[in-house]
């Protein structure tokens, strides 16, 4: 295991959900922790808790969609602790609705946080990690990017989210392959959770003022209600997922799943692609759900 006492962790979205739980795991392992989040009050509470576990914490308020702010995060990390062994590009937001009903602001916000936030993290930390590895043959580093099962499937009525998470899976797989060309000491991983109770369905609370939320359409209201129900009723906890993230790093496993049974849907999608055949009805196993969604959208 490489993520132990004396190691350095950088975690975005650290004030809640997977990020807060990962901070707790890192604290129990004796790591120094950089906790980054957009929500200042929640970050202050999270910092106090993690410091109460005995960890040394550097809090950093930022919007991960802003390149300069992620660059400042890296600079602060290097100055305070050094090069991180664990970078968890985890901050993310959710949005739903029919894909043509997303506004330009919706696209800019979701892609900015979910995709560019990860890209900025990869861009600013990977070179320093490679340099640390080149100087010390025993040094090990891990970069974990939070995607989603929505990055492997394409559920209807959540298009902008699907697009952003598919891109994160692609980026992570490419990072894995690129790193393998140049080092055996820095490793990439991708987290693809399914429905886990976190604050993701209420992420609009942190939407920036310069990307205003338009009056929601019928499809967006339906997507919000379905997301609230699905996320809120999840049985797998964020704490379990965070533990699995660290265990995946320990075992150098690339794909990290919260609900492996959902991979059946991924297999069907891949079979659609290679057969080829038209995309399979995602509600084939639960036709009543698809019928109700159609009824609501068509206003019957």
Image (cartoon, grey):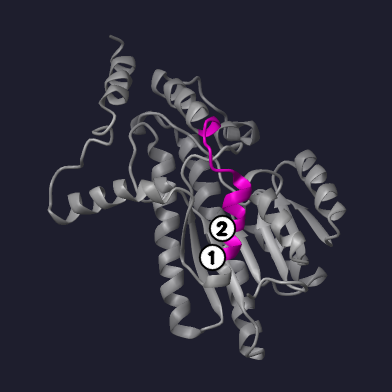
The residue at the point 59 percent across, 31 percent down is 202
Counting from the top left corner in percent of width and height, residue 109 is at 53, 41
Tag 1 residue: 248
Asked if one can make out residue 62 in the rendered structure from this viewpoint, the answer is no
Q: Quadrant of residue 244?
A: bottom right
Cα gap from disc 2 to disc 1, whole angstroms: 6 Å
Q: Is residue 184 left or right of residue 27?
A: left
Split into 4 quadrants, where in the image is the N terminus?
A: bottom right
Name above or below for residue 248 compared with residue 130.
Answer: above
Mark 1, residues whose alpha carbon is within 10 Å: few (<14), some, or many (≥20)?
many
- At x 25%, y 48%, the residue is 269
Q: Would residue 66 be found to the left or right of residue 50 on screen?
A: left
Indicate the secondary structure of the residue bearing disc 2: helix
Residue interval drawn in magenta? 231-248
Q: Position of residue 231 (x, y in %)?
A: 52, 34
- Depicted 31 relative to depicted 192: above or below: below
Q: Is the residue under label 1 in contact with that under label 2 (CB below 8 Å)?
A: yes
Front residue of this view, candidates 31 and 87: 31
**Residue 270 in magenta?**
no
Q: Secondary structure at mark 1?
A: helix
Residue 80 drawn above or below residue 20 = below
Residue 50, image x, y percentages:
80, 53
Circle 2 packing at 10 Å, graded few (<14), some (14-19), many (20+), is some
The image quadrant of residue 128 is: bottom right
Q: Which residue is mark 2?
A: 244
Image coordinates for residue 34, horizontal then vertical, percent: 75, 60
Residue 241 covered by magenta stretch = yes
Q: Main secondary structure of the magenta part?
A: helix
């Amino acid at each position: 295991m490489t993520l132990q006492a004396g190691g350095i962790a950088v975690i975005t979205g650290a004030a809640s959900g997977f990020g807060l739980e990962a901070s707790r795991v890192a604290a129990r392992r004796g790591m120094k922790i950089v906790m980054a989040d957009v929500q200042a009050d929640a970050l202050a509470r999270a910092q106090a808790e993690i410091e109460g576990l005995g960890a040394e914490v550097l809090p950093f308020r930022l919007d991960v969609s802003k390149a300069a702010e992620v660059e400042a995060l890296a600079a602060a990390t290097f100055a305070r602790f050094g090069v991180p062994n664990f970078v968890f590009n985890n901050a993310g937001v959710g949005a739903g609705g029919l894909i043509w009903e997303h506004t330009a602001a919706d696209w800019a916000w979701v892609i900015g946080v979910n995709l560019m936030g990860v890209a900025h993290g990869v861009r600013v930390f990977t070179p320093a990690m490679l340099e640390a590895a080149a100087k010390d043959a025993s040094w090990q580093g891990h970069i974990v990017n939070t995607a989603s099962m929505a990055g492997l499937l394409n559920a209807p009525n959540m298009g902008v989210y699907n697009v952003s998470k598919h891109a994160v899976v692609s980026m992570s797989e490419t990072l894995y392959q690129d790193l393998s060309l140049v080092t055996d000491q820095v490793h990439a991983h991708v987290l693809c959770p399914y429905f886990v109770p976190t604050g993701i369905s209420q992420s609009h609370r942190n939407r920036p003022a310069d990307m205003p939320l338009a009056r929601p359409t019928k499809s967006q209201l339906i997507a919000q209600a379905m997301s609230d129900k699905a996320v809120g009723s999840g049985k797998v906890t964020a704490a379990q997922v965070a533990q699995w993230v660290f265990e995946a790093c320990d075992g150098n496993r690339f794909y990290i799943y919260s609900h492996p049974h959902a991979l059946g849907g991924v297999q069907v999608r891949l079979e659609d692609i290679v057969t080829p055949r038209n995309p399979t009805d995602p509600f084939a196993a639960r036709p009543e759900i698809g019928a109700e969604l159609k009824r609501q959208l068509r206003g019957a």
